[in-house]
Amino acid sequence: MNNPNLKQQGETGLERLCDGNAREHIIHDFGQPGFERMEAEFAGEAFAPHRHDTYALGITLRGVQTFWYRGERRISLPGNCIILHPDELHDGGAGDDTGLKYRMLYLEPSLLTPALAQAGLSLPFVGTPIVDHPTLTRLLCSVLSCMDDRLDDLETDSFLALLAPVLTELSTGSTKPAGALPVRELQRVRDFLASHADENISSARLESISGLDRFALARHFRTLFGTTPHRFLVMRRLAAAREKIGGGMGLADIAMATGFADQAHLTRHFKKTYGMTPGRWAELARTSGG
């Protein structure tokens, strides 16, 4: 349903989010690593089933937003907030002929970890993907209202500090105490994967870095960061490839530069993750501010 409290929770911010001419596009602000903002506007079914290794947090701005998530067809109307958990399969499209506009924040779970650790908790799972929540609306408006504005560290840290208790409040699943996890060792693995994403990395190498056996590592990594080490590595490669698409480099060269075996390997993973081919992404996408 439409949010009855928009005036109280930042109507101006939502109006700014809705500014602009209607046309099919994706505007993507790569911004800070792990803190990516996107605006999308289109008609019909836009995204095939896919999954991210990030939280996807957003606001429906115009039209009817529909997506399949955890066994049900979901419908979000203007003013509704969307919360998708990392690694959950979903698709996306417009629910009627008027078209759809929305903005999303794709937030890497590792950015939330320090804020959650203060409460001694791991990642919260929010089972209801569409919510009417004034505090969350205000928070999302604070970072999504102006895509051309670069967010500094102080802004993002403040946002994360306020977001962590909201997601914990909305959580419908049990949260494992963060103190039970080898957080420092897992963070070392995460940082190593992020900085060596274009390399061929073995389980033995990660065992050496973490001091954990590969099975415990995979299990604990998923609990803390919402995905497996392999999936995290593939996602970093895809993020690097996505930034290069549209820059004049051919897909075969992009695949080689970002750690994929070949163009087909890149294309297969790209569609599984973003719900469209690299070619379609290039047609729709333009970088914020560019």
Image (cartoon, rainbow, N blue to C red):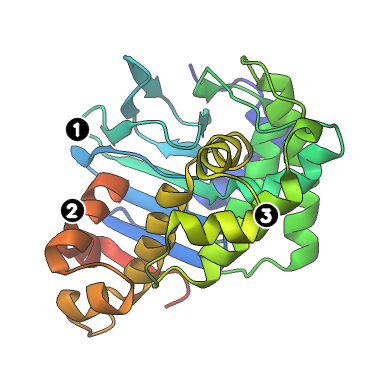
Classify residue 245 as left or right of residue 78: left
Classify residue 129 as left or right of residue 172: left
Front residue of 245/46: it is 245
Residue furthest bottom as drawn: 248
Amino acid type for the residue under numbered disc 2? Arg
Callout 1: helix, strand or loop? Answer: loop
Q: Earlier in the sequence, mark 1 or mark 2?
A: 1
Instruction: Indicate whether 83 appears above or below 275.
Output: above
Query: Which numbered circle lies on residue 97?
Result: 1
Instruction: Indicate whether 15 appears above or below 63.
Output: below
Please identify the quarter of the rendering in which residue 81 is found. Answer: top right
Front residue of 265/105: it is 265
Residue on which disc 3 sits:
187
Q: Earlier in the sequence, mark 3 or mark 1?
A: 1
Please identify the quarter of the rendering in which residue 156 is found. Answer: bottom right
Amino acid type for the residue under numbered disc 3? Gln
